[in-house]
Image: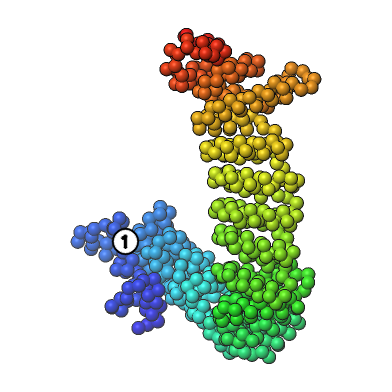
Amino acid sequence: MRRRDAVFLLSRRLFSSETEKKPTPLYSFLKPSLFSLTRSQQEPPPKSKRDSNSSSSSPPRKSDLEASIQQSLFNGHTDQAWKSFRALANGGPSSFPDKPLINSMITHLSSTNDAHNLKRAYASVIFALEKNPSSLEFSTVKSLLDSVKTAAPALALVKSMLSHRFFMPFPMWGGAVLDLCRKNGSLSCFLGVFRQVCRISLVEKLDFMKPDLAACNAALHHCCREVGSIVEAEKVIESMSILGIKPDESTYGSLAYLYAFRGLHDKITDLEYLMDKLGVSNERPLFHNLICGFINCGDFDSIPDTVFRALKGGNGLDPETCIEIVRSFKPDGNQQKSVLAKLIMDSQKVEPSSVAVESSFGYCIVDACIHLGLPEKAHGILDELNARGADIGLGIYIPILKVYCRERRTAEASQLVSEISDQGLILDVETYDALIESSMSCQDFRSAFSLFRDMRRARIPELQSGYLTIMTGLTEHRRPELMAAFLDEAVGDLRIALGTHDWNSIVHAFCKAGRTEDARRTARRMAFLGFEPDEQTYLSMVNGYAASGKFFSVLMVWNEVKRRVYYSAARGDGHDDDKKEKRLKVVGNVLVDALLYGLVKGGFFEAVMEVVELSREMKMFVDKWRYKQAYMEAHGKKVKKLSRMRKRNPRKTQALIAFRNWAGLAL
């Protein structure tokens, strides 16, 4: 089979999973069997015999076919354009499409985002490379390469370009092909193309064909990491030197991995010396690759020395390196914790004191444990460090606290905070608040209280946020008894701004739960500590007593309100407006409404009329219909006993009559 047939067979194999049983004819892409028209755009039926004879006697001229292609492309009729293009290309050397036309055709086919048309574009490029490479524009081939989604056809096309001496500048195709090879795991195939390009650039002295640094590093990475060949790696380095491509830290990192993996310590020393002479300041990739190389070959004894050299140089180790270190130590239990703890302690001796906490080796190791889903291992390392008397900074604890908070392991977080406090370390307010919020969200009230007490003992200047988080959570979860205990504990701390509203929330919660006696005791405790009850306090208690049917207690509340309204507000000199304002702080429309309803239900009509008189003085609107209904529900059947009541309790009878007159009830 001729070479042209082999090229096209390759293109068929790259784009199709099916295998042809029969050998593919020369330029089979020109034949209908491969690229037939779609069903929606079928070719017209065969002409009559007379028309056929006429057509065969006068084949379409080249100019007519080219005009047909241009018109079809302009109108977006891809299949018709392809039909004319196929006829033109099949007409022999004299009818080879003009350069602008063939480039337009390939560019259009590449841009349709259709696999069928992409095959046509690919086969057309191969055809042009075989027949007349100079007919192709670089931009045309680039458009095709940008449309290809897999590495195999892209590499085959590049090889065909090079074999036909179609030297397209490397920057126009190298990056796209390299990305495809990385995505498809085909760097081994890319290595062959890389070598060929290097050779062409040197032999032909074509600087624009020279591969860039990214391509060189990719080829070197494959030789060092995947092949593990020193010979192949040094060939890449030699090519870079001859081509004048300056290596970077990634280049040295790949070599470092290979030398560490092969145990070539002398070469590692030479490599570090070379980097120092060349002024390469970023040595993190070097140490990362060295440690990975030692880990993969099982040379764990070389890891500590490499870590110390990295820390002495001030470069530190990135999180990925620490993750590899934590993952590499296979022993389980205390042995593993001891090894890592000793490594951290030894690193503290060489690590510069100026290094930030988040950049310290100990922090990175603990954080790596967290990243690998091993918070218990991280906590165990800290315990080991404490047992050895190591100087542990607060920052090392933070990653563990964060994961406990995130996973709502609040009891463990609270215990760890206690350990931190015992060592004289102080967490910041934000960390405390986050831990308290996490505890409250999962109803771990004990841990939340413990954390708040730690905040108070640590003399944190800002406690208000944590206090509000706890109080809000207890309110939402309807735990008034815990609210009362917590508030009683917080009283007297000047860092917490307490007010009557804090006590009101507890009184309201107790009343809503039907625990009116607890609400009364809370109100007394509130007054004892110097917090005066306000309208909300009394309103919660009146509603609570009324809901429980304790109407006499409603009367007791009114008596207390009355004392404050008529005596406390009248103390001292002042204008009537000032007195009214003082009264409004104690009693308002809502409280008057609640008092009237409860007192009417309980039958305390003298008190009812006192409340009515107060409402008149304060010019409040009162809905009489509501209390008329309440009276009828509670006392409607007792109307006949009114005459008997007059003899026994004239005063009460007089108050009842006054209420009925006020409410508009007939006697």
Tag 1 residue: 37
Q: In the image, what residue type sits under mark 1?
A: Leu
Judge by depth and name the residue closer to the eye, 129 or 581. 581
Determine whether 187 is above or below 108 in the image: below
Residue 535 x %, y %: 64, 29
Determine whether 621 is above or below 14 in the image: above
Residue 367 x %, y %: 63, 68
Is residue 135 rendered to the left or right of residue 24? right
Residue 267 x %, y %: 67, 89
Q: Residue 505's quadrant in the figure?
A: top right
Question: Which quadrant does the N terminus fall into?
Answer: bottom left
Q: Residue 296's quadrant in the figure?
A: bottom right
Q: Residue furthest left?
A: 49
Q: Which residue sits at x=56%, y=39%?
A: 510
Q: Secondary structure at mark 1?
A: loop
Within-10-Å neighbours for mark 1: few <14, some 14–19, many 20+: some
Q: Which residue sits at x=54%, y=54%?
A: 442
Is residue 348 rendered to the left or right of residue 97? right
Judge by depth and name the residue closer to the eye, 452 or 374. 452
Residue 15 x %, y %: 39, 71
Q: Which residue sits at x=58%, y=32%?
A: 541
Q: Which residue sits at x=30%, y=55%?
A: 40
Judge by depth and name the residue closer to the eye, 544 or 181. 544
Residue 250 seen from this side: no
Instruction: Report how many numbered discs are placed on residues in the image.
Output: 1
Determine whether 272 is above or below 368 in the image: below
Q: Residue 304's quadrant in the figure?
A: bottom right
Residue 661 seen from this side: yes
Determine whether 585 is above or below 283 in the image: above
